């Protein structure tokens, strides 16, 4: 069931009515949320829900033991081993097997490693990372261990289950187990975020994908050079609109349930450098990698050189987190090496020399480097990525079949207007609040009908569902 389907919308309206009918009993609301979350997950595949339930039970038991033990570190290690093992089995088994098999073949060993037909649960990376934040927080005594229903809801909360944001236990869990009555405190913002999500995902991202990105990436050598360049920029916009649109939608759903989610985007294409980009893009993941990988590896405590090694390792893990493929490792390596080069440059020369002299030049350089890395992220393989890059600079003599100059002009205008566009939604939310109560659903309905009429047919999946 997609968040964008009519089926989900009708189910959510019905659940919303029952949920707020129990507004005087937060514990009952939590029970309804837990039931709805597992039903939602089981609707995708009952095996997904079963795997999550078993994982939740075992992790909860380990966290209780850790809290009560005089030697909590060994229970923390057991929890981490379970989290890594669970992710490695369901998400990376085939990748590791194929890599090991290739290594054996290169050595002349003819043995065949066993193959397993393993179904990867949707959202496994997100709830695994959330569980890590939970038991590390319990180990550090930042929070008290949660009761099983609360912990289960923390991992299965349906707005964040499939593609985040990755929530910290000290944030989401504390809201879920608070005895205070919940309320829809930001209704206007929630409605505005729903409208924004429809515009971003259903219309704009859907149009870019169907008209430009998908056909050009599938066969770049059959398109004119300008069309390949247009697709190069179009994907950068598509993935931002897709993922930030998803975040807007689930943030709105959570607000309607009286829950606040962390911010996940902050105008990433206005970043002055790659460090700034990762403070703005997928903030819940980048901050998780920093706090649970980079800092535990040593951070910058052991000198400059070791800090760069730790940073590169963290970025490689970020790439591998997105998928069991060499192309994601290349993507992570490009960002890691880019940040390392930036740090080395800052150490050798004056810090932020480029951005200090010309912020727009710094933004353009950063944006184009990020776009270059996106090619490896989007392509189906390294070979397809290299084919796309060659097509960007090869004059194949193909005639223009798409309006590449028009799209390039639109993308250039979008990039130039980013500082204004980034603050536009908040201003619109303020205007929405000034409307009478009856005008808000009318406006939202009108926007939804307009988007549906303009958007490509069908219900598109969100890009980050696959991670």
Image (cartoon, rainbow, N blue to C red):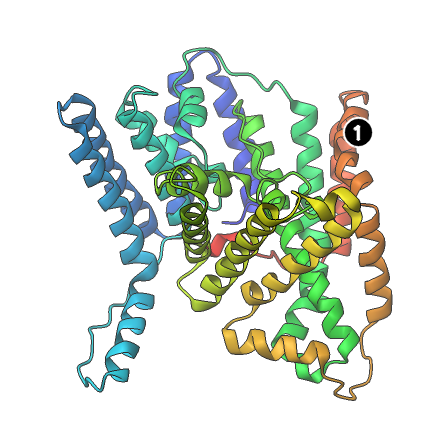
- Residue 131 in percent (x, y) is at 33, 37
Residue at x 64%, y 45% (from the top left corner)? 245
Residue at x 77%, y 22% (from the top left corner)? 433
Residue at x 52%, y 25% (from the top left corner)? 259
Left or right for 25, reference 229: left
Image vertical order of residue 234 relative to residue 181, above or below: below
Q: Quadrant of residue 230?
A: bottom right
Question: Can residue 237 be seen at all in this image of the molecule?
Answer: no
Q: Nearer the viewer, residue 171 or 317?
A: 317
Identify the element where label 1 is drawn: helix
Question: Can residue 298 be seen at all in this image of the molecule?
Answer: yes
Residue named by callout 1: 427
Q: Nearer the viewer, residue 102 or 255?
A: 102
Image vertical order of residue 191 relative to residue 54, above or below: above
- Residue 155 in percent (x, y) is at 37, 36
- Residue 460 in percent (x, y) is at 60, 57
Packing grade of label 1 (10 A; few <14, some 14-19, many >=20) is: few
- Residue 111 in percent (x, y) is at 17, 82
Left or right for 234, reference 296: right
Q: Nearer the viewer, residue 445 or 270?
A: 270
Q: Quadrant of the C terminus?
A: bottom left
Q: Nearer the viewer, residue 379 or 394?
A: 394
Image vertical order of residue 439 relative to residue 4, above or below: above
């Amino acid at each position: 069931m997609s968040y964008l389907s009519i089926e989900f919308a009708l189910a959510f309206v019905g659940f919303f009515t029952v949920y707020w009918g129990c507004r005087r009993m937060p514990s009952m609301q939590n029970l309804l949320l837990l039931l709805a979350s597992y039903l939602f997950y089981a609707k995708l595949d009952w095996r997904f829900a079963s795997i999550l339930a078993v994982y939740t039970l075992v992790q909860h038991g380990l966290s209780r033991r850790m809290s009560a033990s005089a030697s909590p570190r060994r229970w923390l290690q057991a929890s981490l081993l379970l989290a890594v093992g669970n992710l490695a089995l369901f998400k990376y088994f085939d990748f590791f097997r194929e890599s090991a098999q290739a290594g054996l073949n290169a050595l002349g060993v003819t043995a065949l490693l066993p193959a397993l037909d393993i179904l990867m649960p949707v959202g496994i990376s997100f709830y695994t990372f959330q569980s890590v934040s939970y038991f590390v927080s319990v180990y550090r005594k930042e929070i008290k261990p949660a009761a099983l229903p609360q912990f289960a809801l923390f991992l299965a909360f349906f707005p964040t289950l499939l593609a985040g944001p990755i929530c910290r236990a000290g944030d989401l869990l504390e809201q879920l187990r608070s005895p205070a009555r919940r309320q829809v405190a930001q209704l206007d913002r929630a409605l505005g975020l729903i409208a924004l999500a429809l515009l971003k995902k259903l219309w704009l991202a859907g149009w870019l994908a169907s008209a430009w990105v998908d056909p050009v990436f599938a066969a770049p050598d059959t398109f004119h050079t300008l069309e390949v360049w247009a697709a190069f920029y179009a994907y950068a916009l598509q993935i931002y609109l897709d993922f930030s649109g998803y975040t807007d939608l689930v943030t709105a759903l959570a607000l309607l349930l009286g829950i606040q989610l962390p911010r996940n985007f902050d105008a990433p294409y206005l970043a002055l450098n790659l460090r700034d980009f990762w403070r703005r893009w997928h903030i819940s993941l980048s901050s998780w990698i920093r706090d649970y990988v980079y800092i535990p590896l040593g951070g910058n405590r052991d000198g400059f050189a070791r800090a760069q090694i730790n940073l590169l390792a963290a970025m490689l893990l970020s790439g591998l987190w997105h998928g069991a493929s060499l192309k994601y490792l290349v993507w992570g390596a490009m960002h890691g090496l880019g940040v390392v080069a930036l740090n080395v440059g800052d150490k050798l020369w004056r810090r932020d020399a480029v951005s200090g002299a010309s912020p727009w030049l710094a933004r353009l350089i950063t944006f184009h480097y990020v776009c270059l890395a996106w090619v490896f992220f989007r392509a189906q393989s390294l070979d397809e990525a290299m084919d796309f890059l060659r097509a960007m600079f090869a004059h194949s003599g193909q005639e223009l079949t798409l309006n590449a100059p028009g799209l390039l002009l639109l993308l250039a205008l979008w990039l130039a207007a980013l500082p204004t566009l980034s603050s536009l939604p908040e201003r619109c939310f303020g205007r929405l609040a000034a409307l009478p109560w009856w005008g808000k659903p009318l406006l939202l309905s009108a926007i939804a009908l307009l988007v549906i009429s303009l958007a490509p047919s069908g219900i598109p999946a969100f890009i980050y569902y696959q991670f």
